[in-house]
Amino acid sequence: MTQLLAIIMTPTSLLAEVASPAAGHSYRPFLDPLDLHDRWWLTLLPLALGIALAYKAVRVRTFDDYFKQVLTMTGMIILGMVASAAALYVFVQWIVPML
């Protein structure tokens, strides 16, 4: 009974102890996110590919050249994102300081 009261009285410390990845637990996708702060741009390719797959699966009339269209759209998405990032970089670094 005293152990149950101790758990009820200190739930945050117990949860922090159980939920810490250093405690030997395996990876839990939604509770322990990946540390991709330096390599976030690597997620652009699977994201663009997934969007192109889903969009083209709904929009094409025949699936004869489906994968060619998916790869073309994936490239267009990636090039569009890179061009947008370059334009925003130029705007923020060069144009805004002149204002």
Image (cartoon, rainbow, N blue to C red):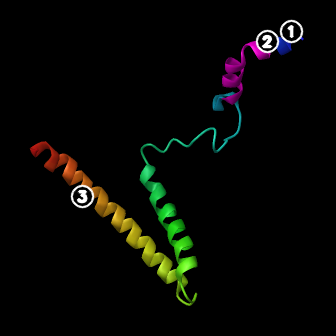
Amino acid carrying label 3: it is Ala
Residue placed at 49% from the left, 83% from the top? Answer: 68
Residues tagged 2 and 3 counted as in contact (Cβ below 8 A) = no
As for residue 67 lying within the magenta part, the answer is no
Residue placed at 70% from the left, 39% from the top? Answer: 26
Residue lying at the far right in this picture: please name it. Answer: 1
Amino acid carrying label 1: it is Thr
Residues tagged 1 and 2 counted as in contact (Cβ below 8 A) = yes
Quarter of the figure that contains the N terminus? top right
26 vs 38, left or right, is right
Q: Characterize the local packing of mark 3: few (<14), some (14-19) or many (20 or more) Cα atoms within 10 angstroms.
A: few
Residue under numbered circle 2: 6
Amino acid carrying label 2: it is Ala
Residue placed at 16% from the left, 46% from the top? Answer: 96
Compute the Cα span from label 1 to label 2.
6 Å
As for residue 7 lying within the magenta part, the answer is yes
Q: Characterize the local packing of mark 1: few (<14), some (14-19) or many (20 or more) Cα atoms within 10 angstroms.
A: few
Magenta-highlighted stretch: main secondary structure? helix
Q: Quadrant of residue 86?
A: bottom left
Mark found first going from the N terminus, 3 or 1: 1
Q: Characterize the local packing of mark 2: few (<14), some (14-19) or many (20 or more) Cα atoms within 10 angstroms.
A: few
Residue under numbered circle 3: 87
Residue under numbered circle 1: 2
Question: What SS does tag 3 mark?
Answer: helix
Compute the Cα span from label 2 to label 3.
57 Å
Question: Front-most of 35 and 58?
Answer: 58
